[in-house]
Image (spheres, helix red, strand yellow):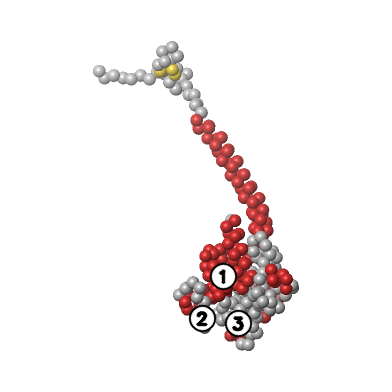
Amino acid sequence: MKQYATDLSILYDTSDRWMCSGQCPCKPDATAAYAGLTEAELNAWGRSDAGEPGYIGFRHPELETEQDDDYFPHTFFDCYFQWKADWTAETGSTPGVTPGEGGLDDWEPTAQADFENLTNYEYAFDLAEYLELNYACAGTCSKRLFYFARSPSSFADVDYDTDKQCSGEIAEQIALDGSAFGFTLMTSSLVFLLTWAVQYALWCRYKDQDEVTINKSTGKAAPSPQKEGMAPLEIESNV
C-alpha cells in the first residue's frame, strides 16, 4: 500500500504541474478550480497565474465553435492518453522526441519528460480513477491542485474539493466494513470451535451386552453373557 501511495503522488504531481497548461488546456470555466488561491499558493505547485518566469502558466482558450469542445482534454487522464497516442503515432514512442505539428501544440521538453515518466506508472491509473470517482478525493496524504480523472470544468456541478485526501476516505471505509468483517469472523470462529468440540463424540466407546469381553487373567477374549430370555444357538450336524 505504501508503494501505491508513493506512485499516486507521482501521478498527482504531474497533474498539478500540467493540467490547464499549454499541454492540457482547459475550458474557461475551469478557472474556478483554483480561482481562490493566491499566487504564492500556486507557486508551491510550480504554477503561476501572473506569468511569473520559472513557473508554468494556465491556458484557457475561448470556445469559438462547438467543434472546439473536442480539443480540450476533459481530465488529465484524457490529456495523458491523447499525448501518448500522438507520441506513438508521430515518433514511434521515441524517448525525448516530442509530438510535432498535428499533435498537441506548444509541447515542451520538460512536459515530455514528465509524461514519459508516467508510462512507468500506468498500472496506478485505475486506482486513482476509482478513488476519485467513488470518494471524490484527490491525492493520498496531501492537498492537491487538480484531480487526475475528474474534470476541473465540472467545478460548478459537483463537489470539486481537492482538499479531501483519499487516505482519510479509505480509513473511514475500512472502519465501516471492518465491523461487519469482524462480526463475520467471530461467528465463523465460534461455529468452527463448536464443530471441533462436537466431533469428539465420534470417538467415544459405547458398551453393548453382545460385545466380546476380555478375560483379565488370561488376556483372551471370552464370550459375553447371553441376553436374558434368549436360548443358546443350536447348530445341527448332518455328520
- Name which residue type carries label 1: Asp
| Secondary element type, mark 1 | helix
In percent of width and height, residue 210 lies at: 45, 22
| Secondary element type, mark 3 | helix
Whichever of labels 2 and 1 marks the residue nearer the N terminus, that label is 2
Work out whether 91 lies above or below 127.
below
Query: Is residue 20 shown left or right of residue 88?
Result: right
Residue occupying the point 51% across, 28% down: 204
Query: Is residue 200 shown left or right of residue 47?
Result: left
Mark 3 or 2: in front is: 2
Say the numbered circle drawn on residue 105.
Answer: none
In percent of width and height, residue 162 lies at: 68, 67
Crowd around label 1: few <14 · some 14–19 · many ≥20 (10 Å): some
Q: Do the residues bearing badges 2 and 1 touch, measured as CB atoms within 8 Å? A: no
Question: Which quadrant: the N terminus?
Answer: bottom right
Work out whether residue 222 or residue 110 is closer to the camera in this orientation and state it. Answer: 110
Residue occupying the point 64% across, 54% down: 174
| Secondary element type, mark 2 | loop
Question: Which quadrant: the C terminus?
Answer: top left
Task: Give the residue at mark 1.
Answer: 114
Say the numbered circle drawn on residue 69.
Answer: 3
Task: Give the residue at mark 2.
Answer: 100
